[in-house]
Image: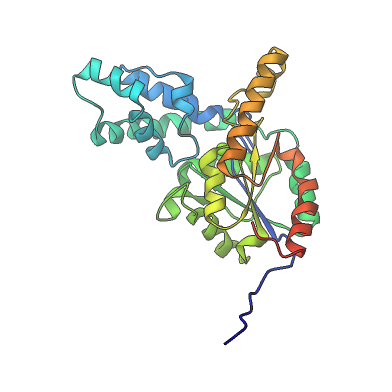
């Protein structure tokens, strides 16, 4: 055959998949960070907030393991126990983690300003709202009920343990496609405040939007950001934009309130036959 034909999707965006902490609620993504610090403190190996935040986005047990693999943490663990942390230590810390996280989740469940307005705008355009998270189902039950009380109820929520692997694997995004009954992947946008969450969307073949200001990259809540010296804020936000862009995000914006205008641009690119 001399000619081959390539099919391309020219329709509009049909769904948007939103992360939870740092994207729609918990400005600064504090809830997991404070509990990671506590479980390491209980082991007698205190960690810094930067160490606690480094693997953010992963399944929470994977996250504890990744902290234990940081050179700085391994050295301090070795100094205390005369051996590096192993899988049994990770299991023990995850066991400590779960009840501590469950106990404080509701305290960090306020919606990020602009979330309700953004979701209403997405719905007005006929989009389905999905979500993915590194939290366990037990944790999500609490957050879903808190979100509901505040007026936010996505159409689908997939946790890392619902699929064979969490971020950066694409499976939570793909399960959203099934749950929402939406295809193809190029008609879907994945939004996240972490690098593994952006990779997750890219691996699923979706458009990705990174949120630089409200999540783990700056790691401060709205009030704390307002109090930052302008020069310090500038260097933090520039670093976040660069890291997310270099990870491959199609767009990087401050927060969820900046997303709606991007939908027109993505729709125009799809209409021209562009793919994410
Ligand atoms: Mg997040």
- Residue 15 percent across, percent down from the top left: 68, 57
Q: Residue at x 55, y 64 (%)?
A: 178
Q: Which residue is drawn at 56% across and 32% down?
A: 106
From the viewer's perspective, is 208 left or right of 94?
right
Q: In which quarter of the image is residue 239?
A: top right
From the viewer's perspective, is 226 left or right of 48?
right
Q: How many labels does the image show?
A: 0
Work out whether 223 lies above or below 217.
above
The answer to which of 32 and 148 lies nearer the viewer is 32
Q: Residue at x 60, y 37 (%)?
A: 244
The answer to which of 206 and 86 lies nearer the viewer is 206
- Residue 23 percent across, percent down from the top left: 63, 38
Q: Residue furthest left?
A: 82
Q: Which residue is drawn at 41% across and 21% down?
A: 38
Quadrant for the C terminus in the image: bottom right
- Residue 53 percent across, percent down from the top left: 48, 28
The answer to which of 124 and 7 lies nearer the viewer is 7
Q: Quadrant of residue 253?
A: top right
Q: Write down which quadrant ligand 1 falls in.
A: top right
| Residue 109 can be seen, yes or no | no
| Residue 115 can be seen, yes or no | yes
Quadrant for the N terminus in the image: bottom right
Q: Quadrant of residue 148?
A: top right
């Amino acid at each position: 055959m001399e000619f081959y034909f390539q099919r391309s999707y020219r329709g509009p965006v049909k769904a948007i998949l939103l992360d939870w902490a740092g994207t729609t609620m918990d400005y600064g993504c504090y809830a997991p960070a404070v509990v990671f610090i506590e479980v390491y403190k209980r082991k007698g190996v205190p960690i810094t907030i930067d160490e606690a935040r480094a693997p953010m986005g992963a399944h929470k047990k994977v996250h504890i393991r990744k902290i234990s693999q940081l050179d700085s943490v391994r050295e301090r663990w070795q100094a205390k126990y005369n051996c590096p942390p192993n899988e049994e230590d990770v299991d023990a810390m995850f066991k400590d983690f779960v009840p501590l996280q469950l106990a404080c989740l509701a305290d960090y469940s306020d919606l990020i300003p602009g979330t309700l307005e953004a979701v209403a705008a997405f719905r007005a355009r006929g989009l389905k709202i999905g979500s993915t998270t590194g939290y366990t189902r037990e944790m999500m039950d609490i957050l879903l009920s808190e979100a509901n009380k505040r007026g936010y109820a996505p159409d689908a929520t997939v946790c890392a343990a619902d699929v064979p692997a969490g971020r950066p694997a694409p499976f939570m995004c793909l399960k959203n496609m099934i749950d929402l009954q939406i295809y193809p992947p190029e008609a879907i946008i994945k939004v996240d405040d972490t690098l593994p969450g952006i990779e997750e969307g890219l691996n699923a073949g979706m458009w990705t939007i990174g949120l630089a200001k409200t999540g783990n990259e700056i790691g401060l809540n709205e009030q704390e950001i307002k109090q930052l010296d302008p020069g310090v804020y500038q260097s933090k936000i520039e670093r976040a934009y660069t890291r997310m862009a270099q990870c491959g995000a199609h767009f990087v914006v401050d927060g969820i309130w900046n997303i709606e205008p991007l939908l027109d641009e993505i729709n125009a690119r799809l209409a021209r036959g562009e793919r994410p």
